[in-house]
Amino acid sequence: MKTNEQMYESIKSDLLDLMLGVMQNLKDSEFIQVFEDLFKTHFNVTEIEFFLYEENQFYPAVTLLKEDSRSCVGVLETLTSPMLTGTFSETDDSLNFADDTLMIRNEKREPVAMVLVKSTDEWHEFASSEYFKKFQLLLGRLIETIKGYQSLYKHSQNHESLLEATKTFSSTMELGVIHSQLVSTVSKNLEPIQVELILSQEQEDSSYPYRLFDYSNELPSTVEAFLSGELTLGKDAATDAEILSAPVKGMQGTYGILQLSAPCHYKISPMQKEFVRNISESAGHAIENTSLYDQSHRLIRELQLVNEVSKKLTERLTSGEMITYINNRLKETFEPEEVAFVYVGDQASTVLSRESTSYFMTQAGKRYLDYAESRLRREKCAVFIADLRNEDIEGFTPYRSLMIAPIIISEKIAGYALLMHTEKYHFTFDDFKLVKAIISHSSLALSNSALREKLQDLANKDQMTGLYARGYLDRHMSSAFKKGIGGAFLLLDVDDFKQVNDQFGHTVGDCVLKQTAELLKSSITEKDIAGRWGGEEFAIYLPGATLREGKQLAKQLLLEMPRITQPSVTVSIGVSVWEPSTKEETYQQLFQNTDEALYSAKSGGKNRIIVSESVLAE
């Protein structure tokens, strides 16, 4: 039989082998088994339970080292004897075997572990020897060393995981990747703790599942973590589980909360808290950098778009061409399902642009136009609606997202653009600001275009009759000749107009000219051109018309003229037609031939039509 000294030396040798095994990455479960076998071998102990002391709590060693369950078995109040003190909860029944306790302390007399055993003769004999205290101190040093190694090893694992996660954060600009890496790394290192990602605002770019932060339903500790930017601990009232809330924050704010839910009776260690804090902050900075990157690129795209639109609108475009261009850009950029451009016409009546989608021609679409106009009249500024409610507009509202941007000309609302989509929150507030900027730039361009068109209209038209001036008619017909467009040409002269002026005065004479002009306007189509040729002479150009069509219009005018004029007057008309030609002299010859036909009508008795005998052709 071994002496107590021999037993001590043998135990010391086994403990040294045990420590070397731990240093060589002996598995936690194997370490516990070897430790318990040591007691069974040397003291013939058949039942034993080994506990480690952490944060004023005793935990079963195997569960603590494996970190799959930190079930607390007691709170140590005082340690004045080698007997277990404190209270037990779930493990009382399983510890009934113990009739002796070995309290293991370090050199500072601080508890580091505890062993509960079912006593044997060998155990009693050794516990009574002078080597027992040496044995206790040796165990204390061993446990302290192993715990320190375990701590360093876990720190190393955490740092490696943190480093790998940080590399991923730094190498991506995708929020979904950052979110996924954050949760998966924490879940892997802190198993079996449940990890949930809570974000402060909706992230369209994130493919990873998350939930939105809800002030009214979050735990007080979660709200505190979000507001303070610090780690907080709380309790789940239903399970009494510990809840750790870690703010995911950057330099400019908190972007969410990483919430850890520990199993019942599990205690989250300071090392784990530090790891969670570090990785959450690293992820927060990555999210912030990604958001700033996206924001900067979005701003660049917006500036490029506004600059492009502004540059395009400085070209000499007509109002219609501008609206077409703006409409196309709005559709490309914001992807609305419906777009309307509305102008405020005379007497404040509204006119729907042809560029608008067909939906606004329906009764349902007109309700949205009425709604938009009422909002503009009331608020006199752009309107952004992320989620239009049913009660906001009469009847069913399939379109939930709306943007209304007024077209301001001379500080007055001259119209508006309306963009709609069936999905709520389809348009962002950044979209709204960009639409306002585009329409604002467009308003100035449309104002300039309207003014330019008005000035051009003044230059192109005879101010008294509203018909086109001779210069405009000359240019248009010259262009038609160059393009090879044929047609009919009519010259009209009011018969005995001098007598009207002499008998009734020039005011009445002017009225007769205006009445004649109105007759010409109402007798032609949109593609035809009527102009004042000079004095009481008028001209009509019918692009692509035949001789029969030209004569038919001339006959109509000959019959209608006496009826619509006051005093009643007649007209003499000369008619010519020509087929496509590209020679400039043909254009001049046409005028001469038509004028000769008109002269023949006048000299032949007036109130008649003469067709030129020379039909130009090549």
Image (spheres, grey):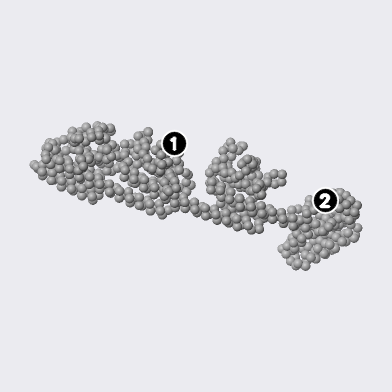
Depth order, front residue of 516/454: 454
Residue 484 against residue 282 in the figure, above or below? below
Residue 75 against residue 618 in the figure, above or below? above
| Residue occupying the point 85% across, 60% down | 598
Which residue is identified by label 2?
515
Give neighbour class at mark 2: few <14, some 14-19, many 20+ (Cα, 10 Å): some
Q: CA separation, marks 2 and 1?
A: 78 Å
| Residue occupying the point 13% across, 45% down | 10
Which residue is identified by label 1?
217
The answer to whether residue 324 of the structure is visible from this angle is no
| Residue 31, percent from left and from top | 22, 45
Q: Are marks 2 and 1 in contact (CB under 8 Å)?
A: no
Q: Which mark is residue 524?
A: none
Q: Which amino acid type is shown beneath numbered disc 2?
A: Gln
Depth order, front residue of 555/81: 81
Q: Is residue 485 left or right of residue 307?
A: right
| Residue occupying the point 63% across, 40% down | 378
| Residue 160, percent from left and from top | 33, 51
| Residue occupying the point 75% across, 63% down | 478
| Residue 323, percent from left and from top | 64, 52
The kind of secondary structure element at disc 2 is: helix
Q: How many marks?
A: 2
Q: Which amino acid type is shown beneath numbered disc 1?
A: Asn
Quadrant location, the N terminus: top left
Quadrant of the rendered image containing residue 488: bottom right
The kind of secondary structure element at disc 1 is: loop
Depth order, front residue of 592/358: 592
Q: Is residue 137 left or right of residue 442?
A: left
Of callouts 2 and 1, the N-terminal one? 1
| Residue 386, percent from left and from top | 55, 42
